[in-house]
Image: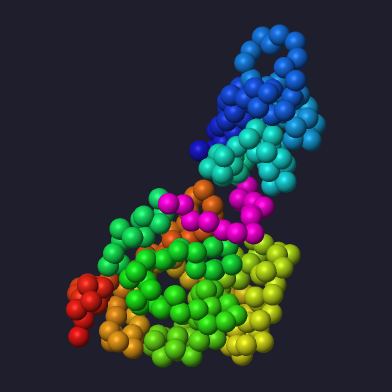
Amino acid sequence: MDENERRQALADFLRQRRAGLTPAEVGLPPGLRRRTPGLRREEVAQLANIGVSWYVWLEQGREVNPSAQVLDSLAGALRLTPNERRHLFVLAGQMLSPQTTPAEECVSPVLRQMLADLKPSPAYVIGRRWDYLAWNQAADAVFAISDAPAPYGRNLVWRFFTDPAMRQHFPNWEQMARGVLAEFRTASVRHLGDRAFTDLIKALKQSSPEFCQWWPHHDAPRSLDGDKTLDHPTLGRLEFEFVILQVLSDPDVKLTIFTPKATTRAKLQQHLAGTFE
């Protein structure tokens, strides 16, 4: 859509969401009899702490450019779901800003079931700091995720740069490590000031000469799909095609799926069945 269509779509979306709320849902008194359902424009502006005229212009599709901060205020005022919040940012032509995230990250039962159903394809879910949040049996067999060396054993970046076995497993370790670092740096920018990120980066710089050397380079992230080959200590050479999928309801959560090529698939099926020799 062109700019006029985008602004009109934003205006329509705001009006629809405003009409779908009651004063009681947002903690406001019912007030006098209302001619139309939903909140008044001035009530939304009050809840979002923005000017009434400015909000009216948004609903009229005028040429105004709300900042990410204003959009977040509107998302809170209109009680938007994560997907609706994402849609709001898209309609406003803004990059999606990170939400305030809880200290503990969770994986939905639906996503956990998907991991189990992907067998024998290894698959895992990582969170905002690239910690493993969930994985299936095949992923554990290939990447030994359950074997968690201190202090950041359940962190993919930490293991990639500090675990000597990783260099043995991946023939093109340096190329892959640079790609991992580039994506991790991009993720860290979304959470500037996050103490947990800062501590992890500091520990990586102290523990890995390569991480310390490459961190200032600002390399561009690699493709989110491709081929991956590794030498497994028990299964031998394994070959996969992989893809990284972003969870729309939480852009900081990503699902990585490794589709085994024919020979690798047979090895994994035998191993997971307990008959690999």
Q: Is residue 8 placed above or below 137 in the rendered structure?
A: above
Q: What residue sits 34% from the left and 69% below the top?
A: 137
Q: Is residue 39 placed above or below 164 in the rendered structure?
A: above
Picture coordinates of residue 80, whole percent (x, y): 60, 37
Image quadrant assignment for residue 145: bottom left
Q: What residue sits 20% from the left and 85% below the top?
A: 277
Residue that lies at the very extreme toward the front in this rendered image: 274
As rendered, which of 140 and 49 lies closer to the eye?
140
**Magenta stretch mostly in which secondary structure?**
loop
Q: Is residue 50 left or right of residue 222?
A: right
Picture coordinates of residue 202, whole percent (x, y): 69, 79
Q: Is residue 237 placed above or below 42 in the rendered structure?
A: below
Q: Is residue 215 placed above or below 92 in the rendered structure?
A: below
Specify whether residue 105 is painted magenta.
yes
Rendered image coloring scheme: rainbow
Q: Which residues are magenta?
A: 94-109
Specify whether residue 66 is painted magenta.
no
As rendered, which of 144 and 16 lies closer to the eye?
144
Q: What residue sits 40% from the left and 77% below the top?
A: 143
| Residue 158 visible to an observer of this rendering | no
| Residue 192 visible to an observer of this rendering | yes
